[in-house]
Image (tube, rainbow, N blue to C red):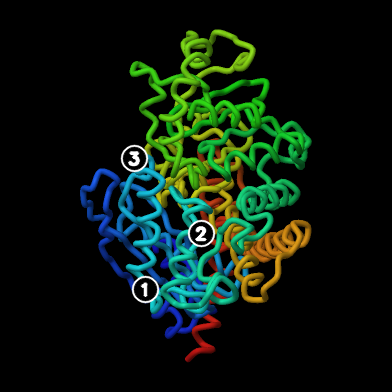
Amino acid sequence: MEQLRKTVKNNKAHISADAAAVLLAPPLRSIQFTIPLRLDDGKLKMLRAYRTHHSLHRGPAKGGIRFHPSVTQEEVSDLATRMSMKCSLMNVPFGGGKGGVECDPGSLSPAELERVARGYVRGLGVGLMGAETDSLAPDAGTNEKLMAFMADEYAQLSQSGSSGAGVAAVTGKPIGLGGSRGRTKATARGAFLILERVLGNEATNPLGKSRASMSDGLTVAIQGYGNAGRYLAEMLVDAGCKVVAISDSKSGISNKNGLDPRAVWERKSKTGRVDGKKKDNNDDSNNNNEQEQKETEHAEGKQKQKQKQKQKQSKADKDGDKEEGEQSDVHGADQRISNDELLTLDVDVLVPAALGDVITKDNADKVRAKIVLEVANGPVDADADEILHKNGVVVVPDVLANGGGVVVSYLEWAQNRQGVLWSESKVDKLLTRHMADAFKNTCEMFQEAKSSAKKKHGKEQEKEEKTEKDEKTEKTEKMEKQGTLRDAAYVVAVERIAAAIEGHA
């Protein structure tokens, strides 16, 4: 909301008083309800659940549903606001929505998770969700299997069947149940396309001509190794980048010569950790508290680990007990690293792909990357955003960087409504078009603001020589006046929503 208020305040000339009042008002609706969960052992557990609709002026609400023990109404409302901005910037016909259930999916069995998913839909009811009202999607702690349960529950409640508007009430489903090709990699693909354009544009690339493309030896660190982090790492390496560090919620690894993302994922799939080591109570990496976004194994990982513990024990004993820094045929020269350490590595691009607020005023000055690509939702808080900007770091905002997910959710919604299934190449072509347009519109707004600031600065600049301290202060002031990519993205999004508000009025 803070960014939204700032954007509205600074663009009064383009936004009417009525539109500003609507934009800055509390969300359209926020509901809280309780899901009674019957555990496998027969005990009853009451789970708190939330859903927020921020704005419906551009279309039905759209947003994920997360299962996480720290979910709050405040967090859900903030994320719903971001979704309004994201949907508008990506130019898809949705407003912003978000939901969550206070639970630890890793501690629940597959059957218990199914009950939570179905209970969430029953709690909302057909009046508060649907293809024309609020279309749900996966988020942290949920996956396509849980989306399938939700879609099935909605179809039964609404008696809408398994096609058309009924199935479009939920996106992120398996392909066989109305999902879309290209959905699994959509967030990563969108982030890749945006980074590619940031590098190729002089106005947005702080690295200079020597790092103007993926193949120029770009170094990258990725925090969070769920779907988004994993596939983005693979795409970056395939394009010629060097991913030198990767972390998840339990561990982290770095290698100055570059990591093999596919080998890291295979290791994580087998052991639950990117470092491939079995749990060690004295391991500092266990103190990492950042959860990766949309982990595909989040729902069933713990259960599978229990079932396969005996099979893994032999390998874990061989590979997992090696001392730090010791080489093996799997780990090579990989070094263990914490999430905090990863954020301050000297790399070209830092990718926070876990949960929010991992870069704050406490560590922002330590960030040495020149580009921060926000694949997670809200990984950089407001105070840190200002610090990074003053330090010359280009932050590619989440509403732009991770918009690929909502674009393909829209494409799935559209396919469901039409009763068709498009090829992956068609989905990718449409995704590319939406991402390219979003970047173009953001960049044009950014360059316009930058040009205005430059002209203003030119008039104010004194001709006499300045001391080194004066020059540093001048540079900081100039950066502050120029605005950021986040400012530009929000201006584009807000102006579209304001136009829709005016149209409704």
Based on the displayed image, in which of its 4 quarters is residue 392 positioned?
Answer: top right
Q: Amino acid at mark 3?
A: Ser
Separation (CA) of disc 2 from disc 3: 21 Å
Callout 3: 10 Å neighbours few (<14), some, many (20+)? some
| Residue wearing tag 3 | 107
**Disc 2 residue type?**
Ala
Q: Where residue 425 sits: x, y (%)?
A: 78, 57
Quarter assignment of residue 23 = bottom left
The x and y percentages for residue 385 are 47, 49
Q: Residue at x 52, y 44 (%)?
A: 296
Q: Nearer the viewer, residue 102 or 108?
A: 108
Q: Identify which residue is drawn at 76% across, 38% down.
A: 239
Q: Quadrant of residue 406?
A: bottom right
The residue that label 1 is drawn on is 125
Residue where numbered disc 2 is placed:
148
Q: Is residue 454 left or right of residue 127?
A: right
Mark 1 crowd level (few <14, some 14–19, many ≥20, 10 Å Cα):
some
